[in-house]
Amino acid sequence: RQDYISGKIKMFCLHKTLMMRMQHKQLFDEGNYMALEVTGKYADDIVAFVRQKRGNYAMIIAPVTLTKLFNRDFTPKPELEETELISLPDDFPGNWKNTFTGEKFEKQKAFKMGELFKHFPVALLTNFEEA
């Protein structure tokens, strides 16, 4: 978690994402793209979108600049709690799993960034079990 200079975090994210993409090729190649609205103080510093196809969803949430939103140990800065994803459609699935951390989230209308980034500075949430 604290070894950001070596590139291990980047390689871990690339590996997990490419494995997910390989396992769910149609979702990533043909799935509908939908940008998600982020609100709060750091809304412009977070990218969030969803890919959806045939009931499968992959939601990607990532900071644009890591050092602005996170401490050196990758814990979210307290101000990040003010920023949340909003406008998740009512028909979005009820259960999500973070591919990077294994954390599970139940259906909610919005996600707090502090909650999503509590254990890792990037989130790839999916609604299928093999995530």
Image (cartoon, grey):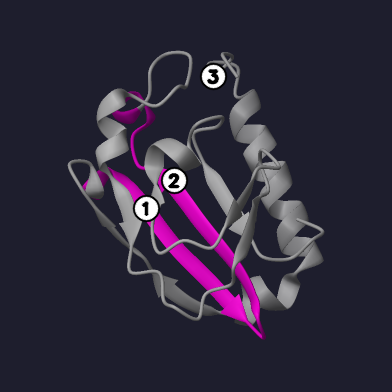
What segment carries the magenta color? 44-69
In primary-sequence order, the first of circles 1 and 3 is: 3
Q: CA distance from mark 3 to mark 2?
A: 15 Å
Which of the labelled discs sits on residue 47, or is there none? 1
Residue type at mark 3 is Tyr
Is 10 drawn above or below residue 54 in the view shown?
A: above
In primary-sequence order, the first of circles 1 and 2 is: 1
Please state, as top left, top right, bottom left or bottom right, where the C terminus lies in the image.
bottom right
Between residues 120 and 11, which one lies in front from this camera angle? 120
In the image, residue 18 lies at what x, y percent? 71, 53
In primary-sequence order, the first of circles 3 and 2 is: 3
Residue type at mark 1 is Val
Residue type at mark 2 is Ala
Residue at image point 44% right, 64% down: 49
Q: Which residue is the site of mark 2?
A: 62
Q: CA distance from mark 1 to mark 3?
A: 20 Å
Element carrying mark 3: loop
- Dominant secondary structure (helix, strand or loop) of the stretch shown in magenta: strand
In the image, residue 45 lies at what x, y percent? 27, 43
